[in-house]
Image: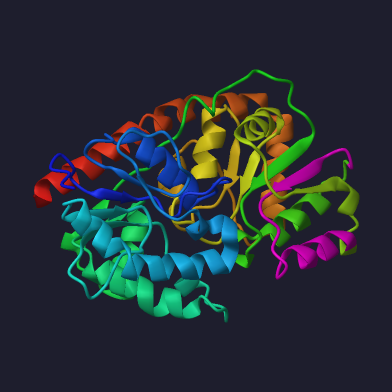
């Protein structure tokens, strides 16, 4: 079957039923793209026009087994899918694409965190060898921020001429001010990996003597890190002030963002920082650092701290709790910052990139 109207097949193999991070980006991008020009390789069996079904056991929901199945499928089955559908290009919303078989691809790079913070794991070879090969072999590498583009160039030597920065978007239907009563807790959204710096957030909360002030940490539990963080909260004497939530629906996240005092995102590095934009869209203050891409994403709409100093983070928390004028100023600046980040804008960059390659 020939699909002459298509610019590229959209590699949806990373789409999952409970998307986080890259999964959210993939889901939002595919909704914003023209389905005739970007037919979706769909593991979820959805109703998107022109979608092409692929195995459902490739998704992140299946953990490392799913990861390995997806890599094998990408190298063996994906090239024939392109050929069978008469499409020359593949668009992958993460750096995964067939190698050594002549497939022309454009991929989206999110960060190089596994290279910046390496650790022994079964996936180390994937990050050290496979991902760099994909980035070098792709026709174009879309980068979610200037910070990511610099990393891809400086760490891996991918030529600047192949790199295009693509500001990601924010789903304003899922993230908006609800004018709810703010409750006495701060919010963390994200995984429990060391670079997320959650231990420093726990130290910061322990410095706030008002025991009514709590922290809610939303993100998938990890047997390598979560138990240690929970134990650390006990050692600090704040375990009763900490709530650990593995996953929330979009509706639940919206409610949390609209009732917390502030989102605390003090990572030691971020390739983008989508939760910060989500908070800004809800008129929720963001306490963050300027490491990685967060500074460019938040602009002047965030409260910046030293992520390695719990006193700096705690002081920002106290400012949020006591200074309504500060909050109003951040909200005003946030409205301007949000205008730079739309999924329609991101989809336009993807489309124009492929049009230039035809």
Measured as percent of width and height from the top left, residue 267 is found at 57, 57
**Residue 284 left/right relative to 32:** right
**Residue 55 left/right relative to 87:** right
Q: Which of the pair 92/161 is nearer the observer?
A: 92
Q: Which residue occupies the extreme front position in the image? A: 1
Q: How many marks?
A: 0
Q: Which of the pair 143/322 is nearer the observer?
A: 143
Quadrant position of residue 177:
top right
Residue 11 visible: yes
Residue drawn at (82%, 64%), measured in percent from left and top? 232
Residue drawn at (83%, 59%), measured in percent from left and top? 233
Residue drawn at (60%, 29%), measured in percent from left and top? 326
Q: Which of the pair 40/131 is nearer the observer?
A: 40
Measured as percent of width and height from the top left, residue 190 is found at 61, 51
Measured as percent of width and height from the top left, residue 30 is found at 36, 40
Q: Which residue occupies the extreme top position in the image? A: 179
Give the magenta-colored segment's residue range. 211-234
Measured as percent of width and height from the top left, residue 264 is found at 64, 46
In the image, residue 183 sits, relative to residue 116, either above or below, namely above
**How is the rendered protein coloured?**
rainbow
Residue drawn at (75%, 53%), measured in percent from left and top? 204
Q: Which of the pair 169/71 is nearer the observer?
A: 71
Residue 212 belongs to the span the image colors magenta: yes
Residue 341 visible: no
**Residue 153 left/right relative to 70:** left
């Amino acid at each position: 079957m020939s699909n002459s109207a298509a610019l590229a097949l959209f590699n949806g193999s990373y789409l999952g039923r409970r998307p986080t991070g890259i999964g959210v980006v993939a889901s939002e991008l595919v909704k914003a793209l023209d389905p005739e020009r970007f037919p979706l390789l769909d593991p979820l069996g959805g109703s998107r026009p022109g979608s092409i079904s692929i195995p459902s056991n490739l998704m992140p929901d299946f953990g490392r087994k799913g990861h390995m199945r997806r890599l094998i499928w990408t190298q063996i089955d994906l090239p024939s899918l392109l050929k069978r559908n008469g499409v020359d290009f593949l668009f992958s919303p993460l750096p995964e694409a067939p190698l050594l078989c002549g497939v022309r691809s454009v991929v989206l790079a999110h960060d190089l965190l596994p290279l910046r913070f390496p650790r022994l794991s079964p996936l180390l070879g994937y990050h050290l060898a496979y991902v760099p090969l994909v980035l070098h072999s792709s026709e174009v590498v879309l980068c979610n921020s200037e910070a990511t583009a610099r990393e891809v160039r400086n760490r891996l030597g991918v030529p600047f001429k192949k790199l295009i920065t693509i500001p990601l978007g924010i789903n304003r239907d899922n993230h908006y001010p609800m004018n709810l009563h703010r409750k006495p807790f701060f919010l963390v959204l994200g995984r429990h990996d060391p670079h997320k710096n959650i231990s420093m957030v726990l130290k910061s909360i322990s410095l706030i003597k008002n025991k009514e002030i709590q922290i809610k940490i939303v993100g998938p539990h990890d047997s390598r890190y979560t138990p240690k963080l929970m134990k650390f909260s006990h050692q600090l004497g704040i375990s009763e002030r900490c709530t650990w939530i593995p996953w929330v629906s979009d509706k639940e996240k919206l409610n949390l963002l609209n009732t917390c005092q502030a989102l605390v995102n003090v990572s030691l590095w971020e390739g983008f920082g989508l939760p910060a934009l989500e908070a800004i869209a809800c008129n929720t203050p963001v306490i963050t650092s300027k490491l990685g891409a967060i500074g460019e994403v938040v602009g002047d709409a965030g409260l910046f701290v030293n992520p390695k100093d719990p006193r700096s983070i705690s002081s920002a928390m106290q400012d949020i709790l006591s200074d309504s004028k500060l909050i109003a100023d951040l909200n005003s600046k946030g409205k301007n910052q949000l205008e730079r980040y739309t999924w329609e804008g991101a989809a336009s960059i993807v489309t124009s990139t492929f049009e230039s390659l035809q």
